[in-house]
Image: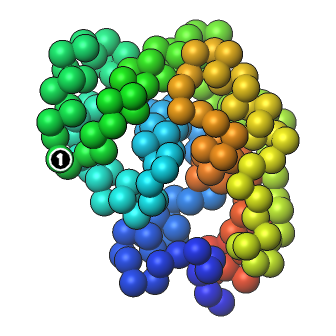
Amino acid sequence: MKRCAWVKESNPLYIAYHDQEWGRAVKEDQALFELLCLESYQAGLSWETILHKRSAFRQVFYEYDVEKVAQMSDSELEKLLENPAIVRHRAKIFATRQNAQAFLRVQKEYGTFAAYLWSWVDFTPIDNHVKDYQEIPSKTPLSEQLSKDLKKRGFNFVGPVCIYSYMQATGLVNDHEIDCLVRQPV
């Protein structure tokens, strides 16, 4: 048995993320919010960069307490642009607050963000039986539909590629290779 081929075996952060988080069914709203934010920060960057900055992001965004993030002021967000420990991309930083506000609206409508998100897969992960990670698409018709709906709800930096990665990360899609040591059939 081995890990999925995309895992950088030389990087302990990659190994820990793959082995302990990626592809596991996430149903807690705070964790779902954090992963959505991380995926949005990753746009145009490497996942390795985001993993290295993850703890700093947690610190500056109140451990991803969605209500606190939704209330952050423009001046708080501007100050973050001076912090070299995070990705200092103005639009992504401000999108974090915008996404928190949209996240809260979804929670109000559905009870939890998890209920909204998991309804897209009828509350059962999609198991893709991946033989080689290079077979995995960067987006799917479902990620395109979900992306479109999130944008309609006021989310930003949630294109279909980002959303497919999010679906993989949160376990909506099981894209672990079939011979991966942590793969659990759905």
Residue 74's quadrant in the figure? top left
Q: Where in the figure is residue 107, as x and y percent of width and height?
A: 57, 16
Q: 12 left or right of 15? A: left
Residue 138 in view in this figure: yes
Q: Where in the figure is residue 127, as x and y percent of width and height?
A: 82, 59
Q: Indicate whether 42 appears above or below 36.
A: below
Q: Where in the figure is residue 28, as x and y percent of width and height?
A: 53, 36
Q: How many marks?
A: 1
**Scheme of colours in the image:** rainbow
Q: In this orientation, which residue lies closer to the viewer: 159 or 10?
A: 159
> Residue at the spot x=40%, y=64% of the render?
48
Quadrant in which the C terminus appears: bottom right
Q: What residue would you read off at disc 1?
A: 84
> Residue at the spot x=53%, y=26% of the render?
156
Q: Where in the figure is residue 47, as x and y percent of width and height?
A: 46, 59
> Residue at the spot x=58%, y=74% of the render?
6
Badge 1 element? loop
Q: 93 left or right of 131? A: left
